[in-house]
Amino acid sequence: MSNPEIKGVISSKAKLRMTLILIAIVGVYIYTSWATRSTPGDLIRGWSGFQRITTDLFPPNLAYAPQVWDKLAETIHMAIIATTLAAIISIPIFLLSAANLFPSPWIHQPVRFIMNVLRTIPDILLAIIFVGIFGVGVFPGIIALFIFSLGLLAKLMYETIEAIDMNPLDAIRASGGNTLQVIWYAVLPQVLPQFVSFSLYVFEVNVRASTVLGFVGAGGIGLLLQQQISFFNYPRVMTIIIIIFVAVIIIDYISNKIRERIV
Amino acid sequence: MELIMPPKKKRSVKKIIRNILIAIAIIALYTWTFVSIDIRWDRVFSEQTLRNVGRVIPQLFSPDWSAFPKVMGLMWQTLQMAYTGTLLAAILAIPFGLFAASNMVKNKVLNNFSKGVLNGIRAFPELVLALMFVAAVGPRPFAGVLAIAIGSIGMLGKLYSEVIESIDMNVVEALQANGANRIQVLFYGVLPQIIPEFLSYAIYRFEIDVRASTILGIIGAGGIGTLITISISNRKWDEVGMILLVIIVVVTLIDTISAQIRKRIV
């Protein structure tokens, strides 16, 4: 006779727990979809809207495309400047937040805390605040992207630094090197490829983010998108969307190829 | 005795030329950027800016607590939108993930098509998707939920397909050898291997979606973003400060909880 306690791989207690979790997940879904009026029924009722918008959007007005290039270029410029600034300024920040370089929690904890807070603020909200301070234009957009990228880059980099090979650092310290020499000869050579790769990744993120900053007056192609939407000029809207789509895909492709060769 | 340095590596002419070309390309890119960017420095460094700094910054850091109930109510709606959208995406992304995984569906055309759709979705910022959905179904949370759902499918589908491609195929083959049909293989061979990772990715995406849904209201798609636009147009910066505080605290809280859950799952 087989052991009566073994009825399968999963114990009945675990099964009960999983069932309860599943019921909770589905229950919360039913509640939230009702509260936000987003049930499948609403989807069916909203179907005519989708049909209308699709027929409005097509065919795109491609004659409008040449007028979009300037704003597209502006979007890319904003991403380039913000990423470059963030890459440079993040260097001291991620060095200070790496626990293996600065073991004292009094140094790395506050720096990390500030960066964590910065990362939780959506970039478009930052853009709104900076537009309120500096007025409409590309400058508030660049500052917003810069601050957001700073938090992202700092986090990616200090995690990389904490995973490096510590032997070269010890060797340089043992032969009398000071902190700056340790960083210059042992840390930077190890993390430089990742640093370039992450910076390119942040650039991709920034291109995507900068396409919408124009909604709040912070420069870039989003301004055109918002204008044409408010004029209900849907064929032009579709043209802008296609251009954003193609530009993002091309930039991602190039940046991915470079990153593959670096790391 | 004379100390000799190790010989320097010879660099091929080809590599030198390549490096020079890269340098030229980078310089050209930056020249193009700095020549054509249109920053109005006179407006950035004007008296108006100084006055704004003096007015806005102190108000941002003294949040208006009387707005707290209103802000929390809309934050609650934001969380509901993120939850509904993420769960929809987590389920809808499963077929995409299966079709995009080369070890599940052997048809190369179908693989590449699904991958293409997923990559295409990821190229759009949520806000652009939301803009379209607001135009389609009107300015309400439903538009935000749809934007979150569609936007999340792109990332979740891709991550799912990677998880599926990395499963242990021996289990699947053993089932097939015993005469199991496709549905049985899926339920007993594939799903048990992928569920923990799928859950973990879905929870991770929920974190991202909470952050994303806080701003959808700016274009009318529901949630706390609605209040942001109103407060800004009334120049109530202390209310914006309250909104900022709530977003920072709630997002940090969600991130911490979800990280704990994910640690236990995988």
Image: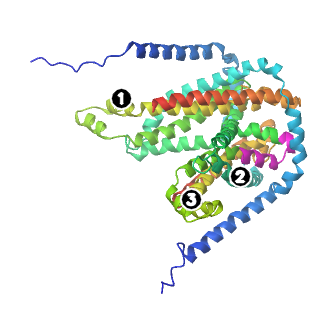
| Three-letter amino acid code at the position of disc 3 | Pro
Q: Please give the chain letter of the residue carrying mark 3.
A: B
Secondary structure character of the magenta stretch overall:
helix
Labels 1 and 2 share a subunit: no
Distance, label 1 to label 2, CA atoms, is 49 Å
- Label 1 neighbour load within 10 Å: few <14, some 14-19, many 20+: few
Whether pointer 3 and pointer 1 mark residues with C-beta atoms closer than 8 Å, the reply is: no
**Whether residue B62 can be seen here:** no
| Three-letter amino acid code at the position of disc 1 | Trp
| Secondary element type, mark 2 | helix
- Label 2 neighbour load within 10 Å: few <14, some 14-19, many 20+: some
Q: Which mark is residue B92?
A: 2
- Which residue occupies 68% across, 52% down? B95
Picture coordinates of residue A28 (x, y %)?
72, 63
Picture coordinates of residue A242 (x, y %)?
75, 29
Q: Nearer the viewer, mark 1 or mark 2?
A: 2
Q: How is the image coloured?
A: rainbow
Distance, label 3 to label 1, CA atoms, is 42 Å
Span of residues in magenta: B134-150
| Secondary element type, mark 1 | helix
Q: Which mark is residue B63?
A: none
Q: A79 and B157: which one is in front?
A: B157
Q: Earlier in the sequence, mark 3 or mark 2?
A: 2
Labels 3 and 1 share a subunit: no
Left or right: B4 as drawn, with respect to A211: left
Q: Which mark is residue B196?
A: 3
The quadrant holding residue B235 is top right
Task: From the image, tell me which residue sits under label 1.
Answer: A184
| Three-letter amino acid code at the position of disc 2 | Leu
